[in-house]
Structures are given as C-alpha cells and as structure tokens.
Image: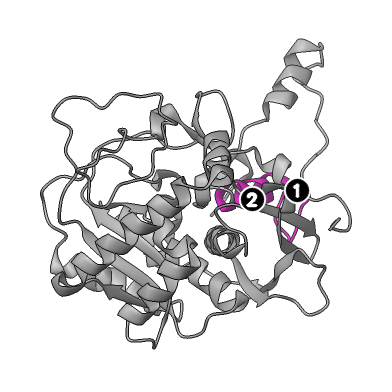
Amino acid sequence: MLRAEAVGPSPASRRSRHGEGIAPAEVRMPTFPAAFGLTSCQIEQVIRLAGMAPSLHNSQPWRFRIMPHLIELHADPKRRLPAADPEDRELRLACGAALFNLRLALAQAGVHPLVTLLPPLGSATALAEIRSGGHEHPRPGDVQLCEAIPRRHSHRQPFQNTPVSTEDRHELVRAVQEEHTWLHVVPPGQLGTLEGLVHRAHRVQMADERFRAELAAWVGRGDDGSEGVPLSAAGPKPGLQDQWVNRDFTAGQAERAPGTKFESHPLLALLCSRTDDQEAELQSGQALQRLWLTATARGLAASVISQVLELPETRQEVHDLLGGHAAPQALLRIGHGTTTAAAPRREPADLLIDGPAQD
C-alpha cells in the first residue's frame, strides 16, 4: 500500500516550515489534490511514480488533471520534439508508459484502475481517463513491477557478456502479451538488415540541422536539472565501430574511455502492435513499460534504439522485415548491465493541470 508517510514534504514546504518560522505543531494544508478516496500524499506518490516513465530524450511529455473521481492523462504540447517525432508517435508511447506506471501505483494503493484511451469527449490533448473500479489487492507480480519503477532507467553503457536466459526471454514475451501486443526477438538472420537500417536512420537524422539542434538542446546537461539527459546518464560517446549504439547523448562533451567496447550481439527485441494508430501507440507504451519493468525486476537492463523507428522510411522497412503483418513500435537492446545513473525527474506538482486543460 502507498501510505501518506511514503512521501516527504516538498522543498517548498520545508522552506516554509523552517525558513519562515512556522511552528512545527502547525498543520500544513494539503496542496496536492486527493482522488479515489486516497490522501493527498498518496496521490502525490502515484503521480511521482507515473512520471518515472521513459520518454525520448527524457522530455517527460505528460500532464495529469486530478479530480475526486477521475484522473486525466494529457500530452504536453510544450514538450513535443518536432524534428525527431513530428507525428508525436514517440510522445504517445511515452505517455502510454506513464499510464502503465499510474495503473501500477493505483493498484498498489488499493484502487482498481479503469482506463479509457482517447476519451471521445476529452480535449485535444487528452489521451486517457482513469476511474476507480473499486478496491483491490494488487497481484504479487504487479507489486514487484511497482517496486521496480524507481530502479528502471535507460542503460546506455555496454552490457556484460552474460546472455539473457531462455527463461527471461519467455517472461519478457509474456509481459507484452498481457498488454495485448507481441514481442519479436530478432533472429540472427535479420540482424544484418536491421543494423543497416539503424545506421541509415542515424545518418539521415544527423544530416538534418533541425534534428541536431533539437538533440543538443536535450542532452549533455548538468546534473542539477529535472529533464533531459545529463552527462552522468549519457553513457560513452559512440564510435564508428559500434553496431547498435549510435546516438551521442553526451552532446560531444565526453571522451570515450580507452578499452570501452559495446557488445556485438545484445538481445534485440521489437515490440509490435496489430494495428498502427494512436490507440495502438498508447497501448504499446503500456506494454513497453511492463516489458521494461519486468526486465528490471529480473535483474536485466535495457535501452531503446529509437531512430530506426523515428524515421518513416526505415520504420516502413522494419515493418516489411516483419512480413508486413505487424506495426513495429519500439526496438529495445536488452542485457545484463552495470550500475549506472538515472536521468532526473520533474516534481509531481509540475506535472499537474489546474482546472480544465488548456490546448
């Protein structure tokens, strides 16, 4: 269960209490909305966990509107990445991942979440509505996934040489099936073609001045921010010899340590949906997060190789590689990692919409 004491006072409240001479006995009025019979602090923790989802360049493009009997998930138009993601496909995947975290956190708090994707009466930015379906006890497996949320992050360092076990692979396949998608573990015969597509997409994007400027604005940051990719989480600067890791999250600021070598044969998996529309993207984002949290709970690490699916031409060729029967939504590199730094997160209060959503 999420309890009120699980979340401490915000920095602002600590300043008010100690810096402005408020007596310790004075009770601070709740500043975070309550919902579904949960306390303000419990809902704050729910939103905090939702905000720990993965997103392209750690842009965190989600907002939440909280009412007593309803939580709305919205896209944040100010956090769009028009050069890398002109159709907002990656944005919807990210918001789907945040939605899955929200579902887990509510279930952990004893609330059965009922989700409506793309609500017909919602505003232009509304992606989902979440209502309470009553009280429930979380499933043991979902408790483990919820506990993995703070530990999950993109692993941009080389993996260890230990292969992913057959049992782990089966669990990852089952995880995405539970979210009505499927996982295509890339066989050896498709690796060469896929690698060529990854490198071609990377070259096309890096030849685009708008893309380079957008990427530079989000990566290689200091550790004092709340968004983007700091140098501490950027991984090594890629080299020409690297097969699967091409994007430089250091913004050219870091040198590669001598002897650094990425694995040549990681486990590569394509998350796929049956259809290719906005609802499928939101559903795939939830599946992506269930997959990633399952991997984390089993001691695995992962990162996304997104450029091959960001570029429409290479995404179509990946679709053709799959036989034309599935829509590729995400390509993941999965393996056994080492301890690495996580990217920063915005405070839960910064993710809220006050009143009706402004489109």
Observer-nearest residue: 126 or 214? 214
Quadrant placement of the C terminus: bottom right
Observer-nearest residue: 302 or 8? 302
Query: Which residue does the numbered mark 2 point to in the structure image?
Result: 47
- Circles 1 and 2: CB distance less than 8 Å? yes
Decide which of tag 1 and tag 2 comes sooner along the chain. 2
Residue drawn at 20 percent across, 49 percent down:
336
Residue 24 visible (yes or no): no
Residue drawn at 15 percent across, 74 percent down:
189
Crowd band around label 1 with a 10 angstrom C-alpha radius: few (<14), some (14–19), many (20+): many
Q: Is residue 321 magenta?
A: no
Residue drawn at 55 percent across, 42 percent down:
209
Q: Amino acid at mark 2?
A: Ile
Segment tinted magenta in the rendering: 33-50
- The x, y position of residue 138, in whole percent, is 48, 66
Most common SS among magenta residues: helix
